[in-house]
Amino acid sequence: MKKRFRLARLCLVAVLAGLILPARAAEKQKKIVAKLADALSPDHPHTRTWQFLADRVKEKTAGRVEVQVFHSGQLGQTKDLYQAVQMGSIEMAKMPFSFAGEWVDEVKVFDLPYLFADRDELWRVLRSPLGDRFQQEIFPKQGMVGLMWVDDGCRSIYAARPVRRPEDLKGLKIRVQPSEVQIQALNAMGGIATPLAFGEVYLALQQKVLDGAENSPVLFYTSKHWEVSKVYSLTEQFWSVHLLLVNQRWWQKLPPEIQTAFREAAREAEAHFREIYVADEQKALDRLKEKGVQVVTDVDRAAFEARMQPVYETFTQKHGGDLLNQVRAAKAPATP
């Protein structure tokens, strides 16, 4: 009797194993589909970088992971995308720090004017332990993790007339991003800061509701704002910082080998981005000139920068000086 019972139990175990093991194997090989969203056009370097990332992830996972790239605000504008990733209805989206300040105080330090002398200084910060802290500690408190960085160049002013010094901005309504720091800075530069959704800027310029706006050469060109604003002055007041965010719950459910594939692909995508963006930046300036845009290079940036002290004082009064000091330390070249 006991032998029959043991035999029956062994048969049951074998049957269950035959059911469970294939099911687990099938689950392990189940295709993973993720949506990655951006508000910018398909020809912008950001969108092209996301497609590069998607291709590399697909290759590294032997087709098991499909990252679907949505551009041009197909899944919503910037604020919508932040909330969608936070809730998990979209797995990934790019977030400009000038918008994220509505929810995350720490990012506001990157909105400070004339904080970085060049792209190298900015990227030393992004790739430092401080940059890692934003990805792995600060945004996880919002239910998201950071996967990789991109920038969108240095922002300059375009209007109907050249802007070489602060007095040239007097009386001009200039569109800015919804950042309290950037609003104060643009006002200090001499203009009238006017926050407005990016998608509404073209018509506002065309109808003279705005006198101008400010953006990077690449985005000025790809947005076609040059059609309604013919003078681009290289005031270069803000560096535009963006982080690709991933829903934290979705990320934590990924198998370790898939997370590793994403991280490896992200490092490669960052390098790819920097390569194509620098080339696109020069192409954009050349094409703007071909389109009849006056590119003003003899800008007295020191005169604008001299007006920024109150902006920095207001920032440190509100947010303290520790994070700003950490950024300044991280942007310095490593000493031999």
Image (cartoon, rainbow, N blue to C red):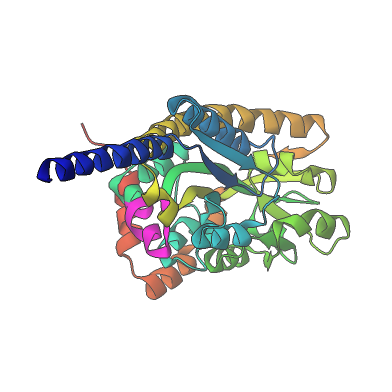
Is 300 or 41 nearer to us in this picture? 41
Asked if residue 297 shows in the view, the reply is no
Asked which quadrant contains residue 80, the reply is bottom right
User: Where does the image place residue 255, in percent across and percent down from the top left?
Assistant: 36, 41
289 relative position to 145: left or right: right
User: Where does the image place residue 62, in percent across and percent down from the top left?
Assistant: 46, 25
Q: In the rendered structure, does residue 171 fall within the stretch colored magenta?
A: no
What residue do we see at 56% from left, 49% from top? 301
Asked if residue 183 shows in the view, the reply is yes
Is 123 or 1 nearer to us in this picture? 1
Q: Give the mark count.
A: 0
What residue do we see at 56% from left, 56% from top? 304
User: Where does the image place residue 185, in percent across and percent down from the top left?
Assistant: 56, 63
Work out whether 78 lies above or below 60: below
User: Where does the image place residue 295, in percent across and percent down from the top left?
Assistant: 72, 38
Q: In this picture, which residue range is highlighted in magenta?
A: 133-145
Is 205 or 159 nearer to us in this picture? 205
Q: Residue furthest front?
A: 1
The image quadrant where one finds the C terminus is top left
Q: Residue furthest left?
A: 2
131 relative position to 237: left or right: left
What residue do we see at 52% from left, 50% from top? 91
Work out whether 204 lies above or below 257: below
Q: Is the magenta stretch mostly helix, strand or loop?
A: helix
Is 156 or 147 nearer to us in this picture? 147
